[in-house]
Amino acid sequence: MLSPHDIDRLVAARGDHTFGVYDEVLREVEGRIADNGSAGKADIGALVFWKRIQANAKWVLDLHRVSDEEVRRVTGRAVRAVRAKGAIVPERAEAARTELQALPGFRSRASYSVASALLVAASPDTMAVYDKRARIGLTALGVAFQPEYGYGAYMTLIESMRHDVNTAQGLSWTARDVDLGLFLLGGEPRAAG
């Protein structure tokens, strides 16, 4: 799918860049999800902070009105779906994203950023963040994608790109490596999203 030139651009963008300190919040949420098998409202709040999304949105208030027990029940189903054995990555991604739609703030396309961050925290080696900078990175590579295609379709693209990079460059990239390359190609946004 990607041309050799675009593979080189993606690999160069990803480069040796590490998100060490910046990703501490993500790693902490990953650890809590690994321990609990679900995410609570505090974990979602941490991901909102990590993604630099404004927390004064109506969906945040609506989510606060849901018990943490219910949030954990829903996110637990999503965690199980994203880690399901035997299903291919895009199917797991879409199933998990569908589970999250039971929560306020996770029903619209605008919620892909936080939802995908939660799924990355639940399955860091197989999932990728979808946000404004990923969209810009895809556009920079000439890859057409619209949020209405769904998170499973996005992960199909990511898996294809991952395969292209690994085959052409002899690397062992994860989906997260591809998303970081897209993020860095996407440049510094004026506002998170």
Image (cartoon, grey):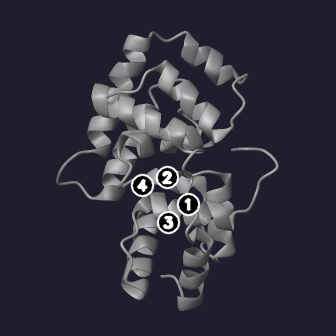
Q: CA distance from mark 3 to mark 1?
A: 5 Å
Circles 3 and 1, Cβ within 8 Å, touching? The answer is yes
Q: What is the crowding at mark 3: few (fewer than 14 residues within 10 Å), some, or many (at least 20)?
A: many
- The residue tagged with tag 3: helix, strand or loop? helix
The residue under label 1 is: 180
Q: Is residue 65 left or right of residue 118?
A: right
Quarter location, residue 144? bottom right
Question: Mark 3 highlights which residue?
Answer: 178
Distance, label 2 to label 1, CA atoms, is 19 Å
What is the spatial separation of the Cα atoms under label 4 and label 3, in whole angstroms? 15 Å
Which percent across, then down, holds residue 154? 49, 59
Are the residues at dot 3 and dot 2 in contact (C-beta closer than 8 Å)?
no
Q: Quadrant of the C terminus?
A: top right
> What residue type is disc 1 on?
Leu
Q: Amino acid at mark 3?
A: Val
Q: Nearer the viewer, mark 2 or mark 1?
A: 1
Query: Total label count?
Result: 4
User: What residue occupies the far front of the structure in this picture?
Assistant: 21
Q: Which residue is mark 4?
A: 152
Q: Are marks 2 and 4 in contact (CB under 8 Å)?
A: yes
Q: Gap between marks 4 and 1, in whole Å?
A: 18 Å
Vertical position of residue 5 compared to residue 61: above or below? below
Q: Earlier in the sequence, mark 2 or mark 1?
A: 2
Q: Amino acid at mark 4?
A: Gly
**38 horizontally vs 114: left or right:** left
